[in-house]
Amino acid sequence: MSSLTLADVYAARRRIEGRVTRTPLIESAALSRIAGTSVYLKLETMQPTGSFKLRGATNALVGLAERGHGRVVTASTGNHGRAVAHAARALGMQAVVCMSALVPRNKVEAIDALGARVVIVGNSQDDAQVEALRLVREEGFVFVPPFDDMDVIAGQATIGVEIMESLPDTAAIVVPLSGGGLFSGVAFAAKRIRDDIAMIGVTMERGATMHASLAAGRPVLVDEVETLADSLGGGIGLDNRHTFALTQSLADNVVLLDEASIARGIVFAYREERLVMEGAAAVGIAAMLDGRIDVKRGPVVLVISGANIDMNLHRRLIQEA
Ligand SMILES: *Cc1c(COP(=O)(O)O)cnc(C)c1O
């Protein structure tokens, strides 16, 4: 593992400045009342692509552009794919997003609308990944990984810097956890700035690869299942280079939530704060509501990672609650 430094994080901040939003940090009166200490929300839902992934992707792409690369590829159809497409367009780079024929039409259109070239191959995400790697090998594209990459991690880490600048006495930060790029970055920056901060990862019970890997002491495979926190699905890579070790060394606790709890988080955010957030982003709120975050003192900051929930699903959850 090549090592990350706080200087890398500040360099990332300078690179992405003006290209991503410095997001608001707002107090949630409702959560503060319930928790008995002040609870703040860091609203990455307000990034132009609706998630924090724009930070890491922008930092990686600015770095590539500086080194003379103009063509990037990814196989992510979710928030990372959107972020790469958006950042590439802003930088005048060519982006290709490989996806399988099974990816729903609206996702294809969303990526297409951001100016990326969509290549449809095969019937699985693995087939899409194979095509992306072929473009790297044979056509000189650079692959932009969704989390296990130092430039991506440094980009996500800028959230930690912003939190510590806005609220220097932060006692704990709660972060949605999947591949661990977001967690590693935020935890690294925050703990380098003040080492007594508690860093808590939250993820879903169903298909929590990083949690299973931490328990096993090495990266493992976990079956992917459907969850309301769809942006938290997927593996961490058996050959994980950075985020497993960083998460292992920086996490004070990892909390697992069931689907009903995640739904309550989404509904609470809408009812109490008038915020629309996807399942992956609502896990911190859900964990607070379930009393799973040990808050002896505040302030506690919840990273609200993204807004990109299917609106029909959102409406159904609100109506059924
Ligand atoms: C990608 C993503 C996450 C998890 O980030 P990792 O770096 O993979 O841990 C959390 N929330 C949202 C909305 C995401 O898009």
Image (cartoon, rainbow, N blue to C red):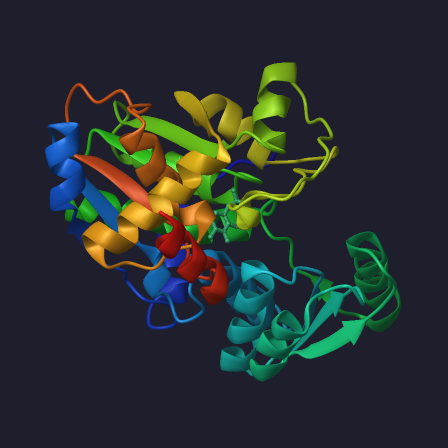
Query: Is 316 displayed left or right of 60 in the figure?
Result: left
Q: Position of residue 136 (x, y in %)?
A: 80, 64
Looking at the image, residue 317 lies above or below residue 179: below
Which quadrant would residue 117 be assigned to in this image? bottom right
Q: Position of residue 314 (x, y in %)?
A: 43, 59
Q: Nearer the viewer, residue 123 or 199?
A: 123
Looking at the image, residue 282 lies above or below residue 222: below
Residue occupying the point 52% across, 23% down: 248
> Is any atom of residue 168 visible in this view?
no
Residue occupying the point 67% across, 21% down: 218
Q: Nearer the viewer, residue 309 or 194?
A: 309
Residue occupying the point 28% across, 31% down: 288
Looking at the image, residue 31 lies above or below residue 73: above
Please state the total of marks drawn on the protein image. 0
Residue occupying the point 75% across, 65% down: 99
Q: Position of residue 137 (x, y in %)?
A: 86, 63
Query: Is 283 displayed left or right of 101 in the figure?
Result: left
